[in-house]
Image (cartoon, rainbow, N blue to C red):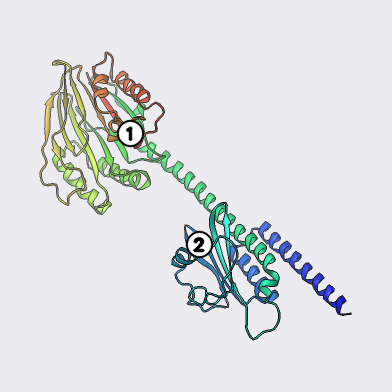
Amino acid sequence: MISDNASLRKLNLSNFKLNSLLEITQLINENVSTEKLLGKYETILRQKLNIEKIFVLVKNVEWHCVLRAGVPEEYGTNPQEIAEMFFTSFTEITGISFKTEYPFDLFDVIIPVFHKETAVAYVLIGDIDEEKQGLSPIIKHLKFIQTITNIIVVAIENKRLQIESLEKEALRKELEVASQMQAMLIPSAENLPKNPYLHIATYYRPHSQVGGDYYDFLLLNESEFGFCVADVSGKGVSAAILMSNFQANLRALFKSNISLIDLVKELNDLVNTSAHGEKFITFFIGKYNTQNKTLQYINAGHNPPLLLDNTEKTMVYLTTGCVGLGMFDKIPSIQLGSLKVSSGDKLVCYTDGLIEAENENATEFGTIPLEGALSIDGDIDDSLHYIHETLHEFLKGNALGDDVAIIGIDFL
């Protein structure tokens, strides 16, 4: 009779364990919340197996506690420190009942859970009461506890990765929209002038889906054109947002009746307000008068544009100006550059992503290819095509490390 009762209890226990695994599997398939999975795990261990204490740490970038049961609320308030200082040496199930110091003092067994070779969870359980008779439930059910712990932790990790994947997909779609919106802010080829005075060509390639480089071309009045190229320090979304704000301010302020010096002062104030000193913008701004063929410009800390003087067959780097925008509350000194241009002269403005592009030997592209591009026979479209082809050959498959923007002008 005793043997029959023992067999029945063993059968019931086996059925309970099998049903528990089936219930958990069903919950996982139903994609229930992490909280509900942990609640089921706690019920099985504490109410069904009489495990008194449970402490579960899971890694999600950093370690954090996802379950604390049967232990004081203040226990394990520093999970990152506990995991790094005490748990990383454990690679398999280990009895720790002999350890009397924090954080082991309340527990009898530690169960590390690994994904490949990386620890993703540590589970501490305790139940041994010296006053009680009989075999500890931890020892009796250790294999089952290990199995159910691994299933729960892997399910939690998979849920985290799934959420992370969905968030990445949402971010990717947001970046696609942002990229499309940014592309709308930059003048397209059909909106650039090709008239008896000027012929404009451009090139734009962000490092990622959105970038911090910008160029623009504006008709100020019947005889004056404005153009610019700019580069926000840094890359990515924050740079793109600041640049979009900058472009809106520039277009609102850049009119024929404002001097370039006043314009740069106003833009510096606006960049300081927007960036709060965390970013700055290098900037080249030009104003060309088609009647007297005069080009006025300010180079605000930007890579100097390169002008081909077709009459003298010389190259001129346009350096006159000031420091970058947002570097100081008030720009200490601003100088206005001014020069005459002649028919056949060419100008190329660019951002540092072009000349600082590196090949497999860590050699920079530099400005020599730009001089070569302006020297070839043909119009400014041919010059920019030459730059693009030369850059492609130079990189030999190496990725660009920064945004690239180029604006080229034929003076006719």
How many callouts does the rendering have? 2
Q: Is residue 43 something one can see in this rendering?
A: no
Q: Quadrant of residue 163?
A: bottom right
Q: Which of the two discs, 2 and 1, labels the residue nearer the N terminus?
A: 2
Query: Disc 2 on helix, strand or loop?
Result: loop
Rendered view: 273 above or below 140: above
Q: Callout 2 environment at 10 Å: few (<14), some (14 to 19), or many (20+)?
A: few
Q: Residue furthest front?
A: 98
Left or right of 391, for residue 267: left
Residue 116 percent coordinates (x, y): 57, 51
For the residues carrying marks 2 and 1, which lies nearer the camera in this image? Answer: 2
Residue 34 percent coordinates (x, y): 59, 63
Residue 43 percent coordinates (x, y): 66, 72
Residue 201 percent coordinates (x, y): 31, 25
The residue carrying mark 2 is 89
Left or right of 324, for residue 178: right
Quarter that holds the C terminus: top left
Left or right of 68, for residue 145: right
The residue carrying mark 1 is 404
Name the amino acid, label 1: Val
Quarter that holds the N terminus: bottom right
Name the amino acid, label 2: Ser
Rendered view: 238 above or below 362: below
Query: Disc 1 on helix, strand or loop?
Result: strand
Name which residue lies at 20% across and 35% down.
285
